[in-house]
């Protein structure tokens, strides 16, 4: 087996069905790759989606069910079940293009020991996809980002997989990337290994969730810094003196009240306008840095 597409899912049955279709509609020979899905305790129709996938899969297909334990634990369950020489990580809201596996394998043939980062193009709908052509506006500086990345399976096992102390949202893949970087593993970019990332415009009802997620990400940022007290960590997480002081000043002048007022009133399912989206992101940033200060202060 040359490759494994590995993904984890939680309560995204509708998206998952389309993502699995993309995984199965590859130009690579079906005998060359497999798909391994970990269902992290979903309570929606995910089991039905996985059963339909079992029946139609043209390649080897493995579905693992576990009690909800978080992404790092789910990733490790997927790694343990994988058989491919290379493991390609995607998320349950990432739709691979037909040449996806083929392009990852082509890059690995040129440099077998490397990380291969594929191109990620954001889209608001899987039904109206943009051209599968990477452009500089889609650039990400991440060294290892599980929306679209592959690495030799043996290397992932050598480093112990994902760190399961990242029980909340955020940074578990950056931790892996730092460990791989510090081991001297090269990271390559293949702009033809394209995947579409489902990023719908947030609605009013999503704002509270954005804020909660930002606070969780701040707590895991502190965990990342404990593991990797390095300048790359501080830049990635925003945990720098300048940024903390700026956001402390913004909290001091109650800037969040102004951001909140920009959201106004309206139906919960109404998409945010451009200015409202800006304000929602500022609210999330305010919550992130507020929680970052709390988490730093509560470190042992």
Image (cartoon, rainbow, N blue to C red):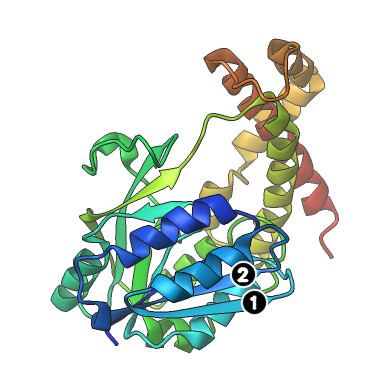
On the picture, is 144 further left or further right than 200?
A: left
Q: Residue furthest left?
A: 110
Residue 176 at x, y percent in the picture: 50, 70
Residue drawn at (38%, 53%) of the image: 95
Position of residue 29 relative to residue 263, above or below, is below
Which is more N-terminal, label 1 or label 2?
2
Which residue is denoted by mark 1 in the rendering?
A: 65
Query: Is disc 1 placed on a helix, strand or loop?
Result: strand
Position of residue 160 relative to residue 295, above or below, is below
* Along the line of sight, the residue nearer the viewer: 268 or 248: 268
Can residue 105 be seen here? The reply is yes
Where is residue 63, by image quadrant? Answer: bottom right
Which residue is denoted by mark 2 in the rendering?
A: 39
Is mark 2 in CB contact (under 8 Å) with mark 1?
Answer: yes
Where is residue 265, by image quadrant? Answer: top right
Position of residue 221 relative to residue 268, above or below, is below
Query: Which quadrant does the C terminus fall into?
Result: bottom right
Residue drawn at (16%, 70%) of the image: 106
How far apart marks 2 and 1 lie (CA) works out to 5 Å
Query: Is disc 2 placed on a helix, strand or loop?
Result: strand
On the picture, is 167 further left or further right than 171?
A: right
Residue 62 at x, y percent in the picture: 48, 80
């Amino acid at each position: 087996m040359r490759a494994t597409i590995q993904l984890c899912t939680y309560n995204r049955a509708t998206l998952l069905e389309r993502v699995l279709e993309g995984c199965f509609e590859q130009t690579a020979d079906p005998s060359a790759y497999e798909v391994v899905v970990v269902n992290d305790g979903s309570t929606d129709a995910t089991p039905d989606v996985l059963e339909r996938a079992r029946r139609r899969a043209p390649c080897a297909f493995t579905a693992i069910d576990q009690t909800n334990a978080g992404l790092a634990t789910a990733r490790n369950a997927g790694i343990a079940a994988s058989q491919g020489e290379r493991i390609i990580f995607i998320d349950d809201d990432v739709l691979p293009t037909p040449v996806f596996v083929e392009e990852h394998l082509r890059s690995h043939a040129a440099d077998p020991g490397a990380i291969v980062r594929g191109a990620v193009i954001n889209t608001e709908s899987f039904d109206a996809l943009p051209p599968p052509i990477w452009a500089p506006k889609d650039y990400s500086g991440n060294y290892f980002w599980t929306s679209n990345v592959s690495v030799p399976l043996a290397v992932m096992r050598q480093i112990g997989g994902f760190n399961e102390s990242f029980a909340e949202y955020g940074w578990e893949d950056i931790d892996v990337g730092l460990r791989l970087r510090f081991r001297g593993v090269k990271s390559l970019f293949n702009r033809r290994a394209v995947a579409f990332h489902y990023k719908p415009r947030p609605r009013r009802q999503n704002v509270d969730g954005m804020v909660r997620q930002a606070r969780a990400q701040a707590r895991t940022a502190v965990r990342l810094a404990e593991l990797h007290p390095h300048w790359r960590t501080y830049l990635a997480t925003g945990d720098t003196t300048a940024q903390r002081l700026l956001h402390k000043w913004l909290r001091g002048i109650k800037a969040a009240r102004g951001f909140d007022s920009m959201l106004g009133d309206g139906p919960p399912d109404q998409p945010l306008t451009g200015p409202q989206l800006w304000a929602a992101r500022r609210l999330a940033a305010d919550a992130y840095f507020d929680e970052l200060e709390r988490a730093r202060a509560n470190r042992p």
